[in-house]
Amino acid sequence: MIKSLNNLFKELFDNNEVVHNKPHTIELATAVLMIEISLADDRIDEKERDTINKLLFDNFGLTDNDLNELINLAENEVDHAVSLYDFTRLINDNLNESEKLIIIENLWQIAYADSVLDKYEEYYIRKIADLLYVSHSNYIKAKITAAEKQ
């Protein structure tokens, strides 16, 4: 699976075109955003890691093996990514507004997972919400919904 994910992302960004109806590209883009939020305060707390795993499992129904491979690939992508634009573009091209809102809510859940909302976590979630064209009111609703789940 790791090879196929890696090949899909290489094809996507090397050719500068969106790969439609290919498995796992949305999952990888989402995982990258989640890892990025968890690293906003310069460390991934164990609670954040558990939340990422649970959210990816719940949202995408991945096997444990696929989930671990996805996380490893996402961490590698975060290490080499210059910006979040390529990932958010892929999401924008393939998901509707309500699906993008779920991603924002998931990002808030990760930010709240360690019981400390860091200013950089909030900054990055706002930035991602803007890149996903999520309105400010929906951004706030997602934040409140995620806080209530804690």
Image (spheres, rainbow, N blue to C red):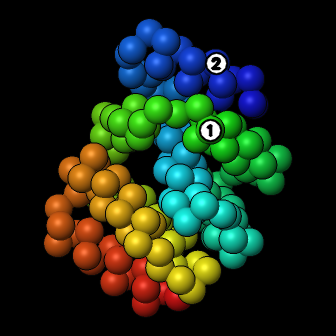
Which quadrant of the view contains residue 58? bottom right
Q: Is residue 52 visible?
A: yes
Q: 78 left or right of 98?
A: right
Task: Using the image as rendered, state which of residue 145 and residue 121 is in the foreground.
Answer: 121
**Percent x, y of residue 96:** 28, 48
Question: Against 12, is 149 above or below?
Answer: below
Few, some or many residues within 10 Å of mark 1 (<14, 14–19, 20+): few
Label 2 vs label 1: CA separation?
17 Å
Which quarter of the picture shows residue 99? Answer: bottom left
Res 94 visible: no
**Element at label 2:** helix
Mark toward the viewer: 2 or 1? 1
Residue that numbered label 1 is attached to? 79
Residue at x-position 40% and y-position 32%: 86
Residue at which label 2 appears: 7
Relative to 96, 59 lies left or right: right
Q: Position of residue 22 (x, y in %)?
A: 52, 26
Q: Residue 133: x, y in percent?
A: 21, 50
Mark drawn on residue 89: none
Give the total of numbered labels: 2
Point 33% across, 73% down: residue: 142
Label 1 element class: helix
Question: 112 and 31: which one is in front?
Answer: 112
Look at 48% across and 19% down and name the residue there: 12
Q: Amino acid at mark 1?
A: Asp
Reply above or below: 16 against 47. Answer: above
> What amino acid is labelled 2 in the image?
Asn
Q: How far across and down, in percent of the image, does residue 150 sit? A: 53, 88
Q: Quadrant of the N terminus?
A: top right
